[in-house]
Amino acid sequence: MSAELLALLQERVGQEVHLSDWLEVTQARINQFAEATGDHQWIHVDRERAARESPWGTTIAHGYLTLSLYPLLRGLVDTRTPIYPGVRSVLNYGLNKTRFPAPVRSGARIRGRSSLAAVEAVQGGVQVTEICSIEIEGEKKPACVAEAIMRFHV
């Protein structure tokens, strides 16, 4: 394990480590997620019924769709910009706590804000816990707040 990486990460505990660009959550993306998961609940896929009956006046994204966008929003899948020098791979290890305080309306824009909560050495690398808040443009409450655990292999 890289002692430099461990030291770098430990210095950043408690700090914001990433803020993504805004990403529009389109109805097409919501529909694709419904197809992939089999969750075709009308609040997600029936725009006409949602306009009539939903308290949000439109369809909303699945909470798990919002959560699944974390790697994209965090930059974990962008091979052009590694998240830390010397990290060869990132493995999603799990979640400690996840909440969905506010729905994401179809067409809304979201972004991810991550801060480093914990760092520890593990065999072959470093385990980090990040607090990720997925914000909705123009809304006070976030769409999702999660404690994400990842293993960085060096």
Image: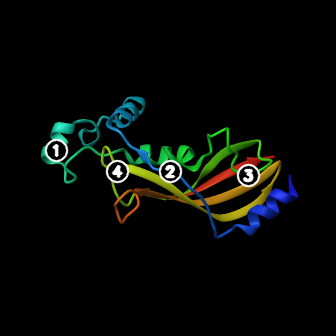
63 horizontally vs 43: left or right = right
Mark 2 and mark 4: Cα distance apart in space:
16 Å
Q: Name the residue under label 2.
A: 21
| Label 4: how many Cα within 10 Å (few below 14, some 14–19, many 20+) | many
Point out the frontmost of discs 3 and 2: 2
* x then y, percent, for residue 153: 77, 46
The image quarter containing residue 61 is: top left
Name the front one of labels 3 and 1.
3
Left or right side of 122 for 54: left
Between marks 4 and 3 in the image, the one whose residue lies nearer the viewer:
3
Q: Spatial distance from mark 3 to mark 1, Cα to Cα?
A: 44 Å
Compared with 122, 64 (above or below) is: above
| Mark 3 neighbour class, 10 Å CA radius: few under 14, some 14 to 19, many 20 or more | few
Left or right: residue 84 versus residue 3 is left
What amino acid is labelled 3 in the image?
A: Tyr
Residue under label 4, please give it.
104
Image location (x, y in percent) of residue 79: 67, 38
As measured in the structure, the alpha-carbon distance from the residue carrying label 4 to the one carrying label 3 is: 30 Å
Q: Earlier in the sequence, mark 3 or mark 2?
A: 2
Q: Pointer 1: residues within 10 angstroms few (<14), some, or many (20+)?
A: some
Residue at which label 1 appears: 51
In the figure, 147 relative to 15: above or below? Answer: above
Q: From the viewer's perspective, is the residue at label 2 or at label 4 nearer?
A: 2
Which comes sooner in the sequence, label 2 or label 1? 2
Q: Is residue 119 above or below residue 34?
A: below
